[in-house]
Image: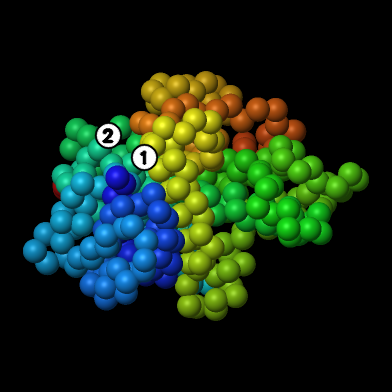
Amino acid sequence: MVKAVVLGAAGGIGQPLSLLLKANPAVTELGLYDIVNTPGVAADLSHISTPAKVVGYLPPDDGLAKTLKGADIVVIPAGVPRKPGMTRDDLFKINAGIVRDLATGIAKAAPKAFVLVISNPVNSTVPIVAEVFKQHGVFDPKRLFGVTTLDVVRASTFVAEVIGDLGKAPSITVPVVGGHSGITIVPLLSQSSTPLPSGFAQAELEKLTNRIQYGGDEVVKAKDGAGSATLSMAYAGAEFAQKVIRAIKGEKGIVAPTFVHLSSEPAGGAALKKEIGKDLEYFSAPVELGPDGVASIKSLAKLTDYEKGLIDAAIPELATNIEKGVSFISASKL
Ligand SMILES: NC(=O)C1=CN([C@@H]2O[C@H](COP(=O)(O)OP(=O)(O)OC[C@H]3O[C@@H](n4cnc5c(N)ncnc54)[C@H](O)[C@@H]3O)[C@@H](O)[C@H]2O)C=CC1
Ligand SMILES: O=C([O-])CC(=O)C(=O)O
């Protein structure tokens, strides 16, 4: 039995993500929460002939607590998306408060749930959730994930395009580490499961790296004011959620990059801090998932000098983004 909950379920990501979770036979209950339209989205999805029982609530009458009751996994795509010319950090002003309030609801109603944060800026919203949980005495670093899967999905697709065989895209894996905005997104293309063509020039490598780092901007520009990635994000979010579900059901050996807290528990956090040469509290790294969430945080393995340079360039912005989230909560009255 797995209850999945989507907070922000009526939005551009929320609706297709809820559809994909409803289509997942491992999900037996699906809770949908938003400030608008969830009764309609829930009624619509409830007619699909898959096992999940669907419920949808709005804020009145403790709707958030009712949606979260019994949740095993909570995915958060609530909040405003970018328009052209904005950075993800520009979303902080609005999304920080939304994520704080939803995290407070989770801390009270489903403190043991696995929490998957999609709302941007992820580099700051994940620390916000952690700080709220700490204030409620329920923080478990193994159960909190920033969803960076879209960067991984993009890397697979763009490498397949470079190779000239999109058919290979589903089987290509590239670890993407660091964080989830611009230069903090660091694809480790030297570790692509399908190597780049021999003789791939440094200039081409830099172009491909830049495309992965700014893939979000490509979509924001093409949508021209109508928002950011929604369908590809729903695909990526459902894929990561499915990995977490498989791991909590006992499947071994599932590894995926995700933005996690680098405490001494789970294993690997302290070693990763040494590896990146900075006492960062959070980083996206390949993580082995297990029945309790993060089983271990993996090493970044052998990096090229170019990749080391990308990580060094990411660290100051990551540190600032993380601190911004942490201090937002220390300054908030919960
Ligand atoms: N992590 C990632 O890779 C990605 C993250 N995103 C982020 O996901 C977020 C959502 O994007 P979209 O779905 O396109 O936006 P959207 O505006 O289409 O949907 C957001 C939904 O959140 C709801 N919402 C607002 N305040 C809420 C609250 N207090 N409680 C519950 N629901 C609330 C809205 O009513 C709306 O239905 C944005 O912050 C965006 O930047 C988007 C793409 C990729
Ligand atoms: O670019 C954005 O604002 C949305 C996002 O995080 C992405 O598509 O990676």
Vertical placement of residue 324 versus 64, above or below: above
Across and down, in percent, residue 169 comes to 69, 54
* Badge 2: residue crowd in 10 Å (few <14, some 14–19, many ≥20): some
Vertical placement of residue 205 versus 165, above or below: above
Q: Which residue is mark 1?
A: 144
Residue at 53 percent across and 40 percent down: it is: 256
Q: Which mark is residue 139?
A: 2
Q: Quadrant of residue 267?
A: top left
Disc 2 element: loop
Instruction: Say which of 51 and 27 sits in front.
Output: 51
The reply, left or right, for residue 270 in relation to residue 125 is right
Labelled pair 1, 2 in contact (Cβ < 8 Å) = yes
Disc 1 element: strand
Marks 1 and 2, the one that precedes in the sequence: 2
Across and down, in percent, residue 139 comes to 27, 34
Across and down, in percent, residue 159 comes to 73, 53
